Amino acid sequence: MRQRDGVDALPGGGKKRPGRPPRPAPGPRAPRFARPLTPAGVLGWTALSAVAPGAAHLRAGRRRTGLVMISVYAVLLLAALAFGLTRSLADLTSFVGDGMMVTVIVAASALALIWFAIVVTSYAVLSPNRLNQQGQVLTGIVVGVLCVAVMAPFALVANTMLTFRNTIEDIFPSDPNVPTAAGDAQDPWGGRTRANFLLIGGDAAGNRTGVRTDSMNVASVDLRTGNTVLFSLPRNLQHVHFPASSPLHKQFPNGFMAELPNGGLLNEVWQYANDNPQIMGGRNKGPQALMDAIGHTLGLKIDYYALINMYGFASLVDAIGGLKIHVEQDVKWGGLYGTAGTIRAGYRRLTGEQALWYGRSRVNSDDFSRMARQRCVIGAFAQQATPQVILTNFEKIAGAAKRMAETNIPRHLLQPLAEVALKVKDARITSLQFVPPEFYSGRPDWAKIRQATRKAISDSARPPRQAQTANVSASPSVTGPSAAPTRTRVAAPTQTPTRNTQKAGARSLDELCGL
């Protein structure tokens, strides 16, 4: 075939009429919408993709990509649901571990970025450039807000976990010289079946030198069952003795300041040890001195201590929105005659300051009644500081905890301790107070105290029916061999006396505090 004058010529001299240009080879075409999307449609599909990733891609004709995204999301969602349904509350204690906390922080940060990318790509695949200028501006602003909204929950989780981790690092020591329980991951308690924790309420303040330990309780916990006995010691217990291993044993062989008939109170031991490092062999030995004294008094080995600054406790109460307390009768507080205010009888929601003074007021009261009120305040706090309240006010609670807490519980025991705490929550809690008329602070019968301690621990290990048959009870004011502890449940608001006038009969914390 020849070509002449721009016209195709056939071999026989004939001419071929000019035709249409050849069609291009078939290839992939850009996706087309069934109907053009409006700004509302673009926003709707983008928002849907934030909940169901891949929806916008399907709408835009990117079926393969959309199906892959939806499938991956569905698999991950089902896996997360299966994980949640197969985990028990005890399994969640693993989140207290440092490694798990870091994992959660990293995972939450990564998910925030992934969801940001999902929203942006879903918006872009819908071709918002086809909209008019006003629609593009409007959808761009709304999608920007949507990106922030979908990232916020993950950012909250990461920030909360980071705050929790920082709080733990500030409160719980990691120094290898700190007393720790020998053991491994299988047995973090080193073969022990019982641990004794000294819980201290201190009243350090800006206008006062040092720390006075006005509230001292020992929680003796069965690590297998969670059954717990609370031993309360009065602040004015006089002339305590120290074990031979303590430097104060040589300093006070006849008892702490035994030469002072009205001195040598238990709440002075901590500060004395801190003020005399040359005797103790180092600085800040107050906690160890108090642990030695109380452990020797009860015939127990005190493993760990936790100090709560009472003035910091007021901040903690405010952080959860106050405490509901059932006040049996008016309690005046402040000064010698209650000139600062009065907490009226009845059910009251107390502020942090009011709750603090409700447990500390001596007006028309005595130390033993004050001890009972303090324990009821602690019980009310334990009942009302629910997981929902803690999560809602976590930042405030963490800030208050940093300012008020001191302990020697090592960081690696947090997860095992959390597991024990879950057991204690559903176990039997019994209590024993060493107060008159069964025990006199000025003339302590040390053998009687140790005997009552042994009996209380022995009774706590009995089944409930046997414990009741043995006349086990829990009276915050009258205790001893004849009135040993009985089961108490940490529950609701409190009803407490203002004077030490409880009857000698067995009374549980439920009865005393209105739990």
Image: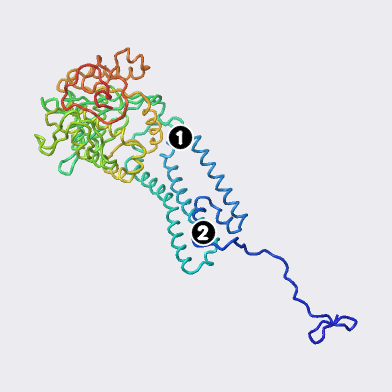
Q: Position of residue 288 (x, y in %)?
A: 26, 32
Name which residue lies at 89% across and 81% down.
11
Foreground pick, 412 / 163: 163
Name which residue lies at 51% across and 53% down.
48
Determine which residue is flagged by label 2.
41
Foreground pick, 179 / 245: 179
- Can residue 114 be seen here? no
Q: Position of residue 68 (x, y in %)?
A: 60, 51
- Mark 2 or mark 1: name the one nearer the start of the chain: 2
| 138 relative to 399 in the view: left or right | right
Q: Position of residue 311 (x, y in %)?
A: 21, 40
Name which residue lies at 33% across and 40% down.
389
Name which residue lies at 38% across and 46% down.
160
Determine which residue is flagged by label 1.
91
Foreground pick, 19 / 215: 19
Q: Quadrant of the C terminus?
A: top left
Residue type marked 1: Asp
Foreground pick, 408 / 56: 56
* 2 or 1: mark nearer the eye: 2
| 92 relative to 206 in the view: left or right | right
- The coloring applied to the image is rainbow
- Can residue 388 be seen here? yes
Residue 24 got which mark?
A: none
Image position of 330 with respect to 46: above or below: above
CB within 8 Å, label 2 to label 1: no
Residue type marked 2: Gly
SS under mark 1: helix
SS under mark 2: helix
